[in-house]
Image: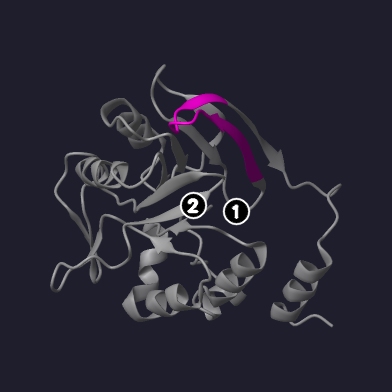
Amino acid sequence: MDAGNTLSAPQGPVKSSEGQVIIEAMNMLGYDAMALGAQDLPLGIEALRKRMAEAKFPILSANLTIAEGGQLFASPYVIKEMAGHRIAIIGLTGSDQSSGSPPSQKGPFVVKEPIETAKRYVKEVSAKADIVILLSNVGLPLDQKISEQIPGIDIIIGGQTRSLLTPTRHTEKGAVIAQAGYRGEWIGSMQVEFDARGNVVNFQGQTVALAPEYSDDAQMREFLNRIQGKP
């Protein structure tokens, strides 16, 4: 899973392809879901819609709307069936505004206040799923507030603040929160044990630095060489 700010880059093949090469790589890696991040929005409506169509996984946002008309830009959540559980994955997009501020307009988009949005959709999916995962691009401080204020979320996979955070609980009964840094330098691995009702009973995890001792995957290396114009 990915918490956003993934499709844009200041230069190089990612910028020139408007994130197309990132989606191609994520398809190869077998992602299950991604949230749209604040730094993805400068690509604009047309390019983002192309990337969403190319992705073999859902790209989500429950609080990103189109300024002209006010409709949601992406699906707010997806529900997947795994290991006898129905798992709801909700996406939240970050902005430059803090919780409680008016909606933030970013070009043709409006990013709505995240906490009230999360409350609405957690309530909605709780009737459809027994496990709720939030892919959050709003940053760690707001993730912690969401965990405190909104019951029913089991896991928050966060982004935006670029925290290197192994799975932890901010409050005793709150969601398990994790982040894995940024720029693909780490990968987060988490194992969560649920009871029959979908409650978290145990969890552990780690962040793994993708250091030189890990050899390149042959298929991915071939892909990288191709987009970098190497023989």
* First in sequence: mark 1 vs mark 2: 2
Does any portion of residue 182 appear in the rendered image?
Answer: yes
Q: Please provide the residue range marked out in magenta.
A: 187-202
| Color theme of the render | one colour
Q: Secondary structure at mark 1?
A: loop
- Residue at mark 1: 183
Q: Is residue 93 left or right of residue 26?
A: left
Secondary structure mainly formed by the magenta segment: strand
According to the picture, the residue beneath numbered tag 2 turns out to be 81
Asked which quadrant contains residue 218, the reply is: bottom right
**Please, what is the three-letter code of the amino acid marked with disc 2?**
Glu
User: Is 139 located above or below residue 32 in the figure?
Assistant: above
- Front position in the image: 169 or 195: 195
Q: Is residue 86 found inside the magenta-colored segment of the image?
A: no
Residue 149, picture quadrant:
top left
Three-letter code for the amino acid on which mark 1 is drawn:
Arg
